[in-house]
Amino acid sequence: MASKAAGAVSLIRDFAADVQALSRLVEEVEAFAGANGVEPGFAQRVSLAIDELITNIILYASRDGGPVPVHLEVHCDPAEVRVVIEHSGAAFDPFVEAPVPDTSLPLTERPIGGLGVFLVRSLMSDTRYERVGDRNRVILTRTLDG
Amino acid sequence: MNVSEATKDGVLVLSPAGRIDTRTASDFEQAVMARVTGPDAATRIVMNFEGLDYINSTGMRVLLILAKTLSKASGKLVLCSMKDHIFEVFKISGFNQILTITPTEEEALSRF
């Protein structure tokens, strides 16, 4: 579903997040952004950021091992791409609670994992978290001017 | 995602193609780690990323495990032919400091 409103084009998806659905969705977001004038480099950054955050939801927010219902919005306009990701569950602000990796450590001392949220921060212009009722909402913005 | 392999000048060349994401990272991990364990374990590996379109942190985790495994075995891992958008993510992560990355496979093989 793509809709036009106030100069923005939006992709809105409600889906049961598992690794198959996520894999398809990430490719869909990249194609959607590309089809709406977002340069490939920016489209890839946005789709990777979405991939990392929903991967964490799948790995850590699944209570009984089943897919987690996730709401995703991707809004493209000529100046920026804005992403909203929502899911219900225990409050978790990834931008506060995920440890920041030390990317200067040598190979033998680098811990395995923990890169996902760091990549999201690095790839996006702005990252925000809100707790809305019983839901976690993350808002990502990627400006398209460089 | 699939991983093809070849041996060149005594170096194992692994070439993953397609997308390494949260769905395919475990297949990638199994394919790669099978080549560095057991009696026929390889210790000299080039990972050619020419056919790789996408990798997320779950795939990068596998590369870190592989690099650590080879380092402990006094072996060596060299990555090559990485697309620009993938190299950007490796730079952000500091992987360009801890892994050897070359522009071409020929150059990668010359590092052994």
Image: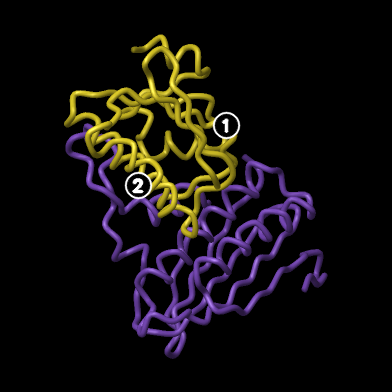
- Distance of label 1 from label 2 (alpha carbons): 18 Å
Q: Position of residue B64 (x, y in %)?
A: 31, 40
Depth check, front residue: A109 or B105: B105
Q: Is residue B79 above or below residue A133?
A: above
- At x 71%, y 69%, the residue is A11
Image quadrant in which you'd find residue A65: bottom left
Image side of residue A12 versus residue A117, left or right: right
Palette colour of chain A = purple
Depth check, front residue: B45 or A76: B45
Q: How many marks?
A: 2
Q: Is residue A72 above or below residue B18?
A: below
Image quadrant in which you'd find residue B69: top left
Depth check, front residue: A133 or B8: B8
Mark nearer the N terminus (1 vs 2): 2
Q: Position of residue A57 (x, y in %)?
A: 42, 71
Q: Amino acid at mark 1?
A: Lys
Q: Mark 1 — on which chain does it sit? A: B
Q: Position of residue A92 (x, y in %)?
A: 34, 74
Q: Which residue is mark 1?
A: B83
Image quadrant in which you'd find residue A16: bottom right
Q: Mark 2 — on which chain does it sit? A: B
Palette colour of chain B = yellow
- At x 77%, y 65%, the residue is A9
Q: Which residue is mark 2?
A: B61
Decide: few, some or many residues near mark 2? Use Cα within 10 Å; few <14, some 14-19, many ≥20: some
- At x 78%, y 50%, the residue is A37
Where the C terminus of chain A falls, by quadrant? top right
Q: Position of residue B99 (x, y in %)?
A: 34, 28
Which residue lies most toward the front here? B39
Image side of residue A67 versus residue B76, left or right: right
